[in-house]
Image (cartoon, rainbow, N blue to C red):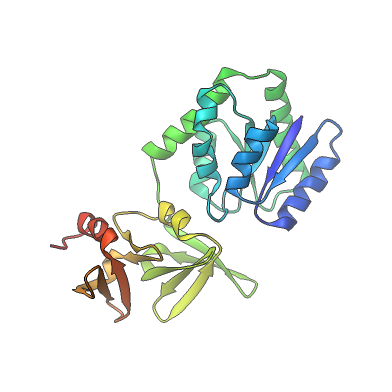
Amino acid sequence: MRVLIVDDEPPARRKLRRFLDDEGDVEVVGEAASGKEAVAAIRRLRPQAVFLDIQMPEMDGFEVLRELERDVQEGFMPRIVFVTAYDQFALKAFEVAALDYLLKPFDRQRLSQALERLRREVEQAQRPDMQEGVQELLDHLRRRRQYAKRIMVRSQGRVRFLKTDEIDWIQAAGNYAELHVGSRSHLLRETLSTLEERLDPEQFVRVHRSAIVNLDRVREVHPYSKNDYTIVLASGHKVRMSRRYRDRLEQASDLP
């Protein structure tokens, strides 16, 4: 069975490769460290199975699947084992679509269960319902989006769960997002675009390419320049809003 490993964290890729190398009937044909690399590798290497991480910068696992929709329609789609740390909505969606997943940190026994399922599906070769399952997942994600109520952040070796209601605003910091909660801030290893998809658009609105605000925290909006505005939060903090994002704020609020 030809397998591709996709994960942006080298230690995670090494662990999975080590486990898979012990399986006599599994060949790891490649690795990818990002969603974009994954799409290119899948189309180039045509693996029978992909271990696909969900939380990745630039393009997450969901976006990889969306990029591969054309391939699904053309009749090719590798078997997918999703890998995730905590996305409970993802787990529910995978179960609906009858796709497998590994919840980090996983052990050899859990991997063996996933491999047994993969072997059965690969033996039946290009089952059309596999492609239908992937398409069903994509449709399900669009129809029944459930938004995060809590976000897990790691700091100094500890894990903390933040209620999304507590977040004032979010700032992009490279491949990280900085969550501002009152006078404190927390770094999350996730891009702003990926995080935006997880948050309820009726509460959180993108106001700049590098900022998302919690509408419940918005107090005032003032013109700043010809193309920009200043949002004043309840805390007194000011966030820049560009004109191109004004429509989003208008649609989600009572801004005139």
For the point 58% across and 24% down, which residue is it? 130
Q: Position of residue 17 (x, y in %)?
A: 79, 46
For the point 49% across and 38% down, which residue is it? 66
Is residue 180 visible from the viewing direction of this image? yes
Q: Position of residue 87 (x, y in %)?
A: 53, 50
Which residue occupies the extreme left position in the image?
256
The quarter of the picture where residue 205 lies is bottom left
Q: Is residue 184 above or below residue 177?
A: below
Q: Is residue 164 left or right of residue 50?
A: left
Q: Is residue 17 above or below residue 159?
A: above
The quarter of the picture where residue 175 lies is bottom right
Is residue 101 visible from the viewing direction of this image? no
Q: Quadrant of the N terminus?
A: top right
Q: Is residue 64 above or below residue 172?
A: above
How many badges with numbers are in the image? Answer: 0
Q: Quadrant of the C terminus?
A: bottom left
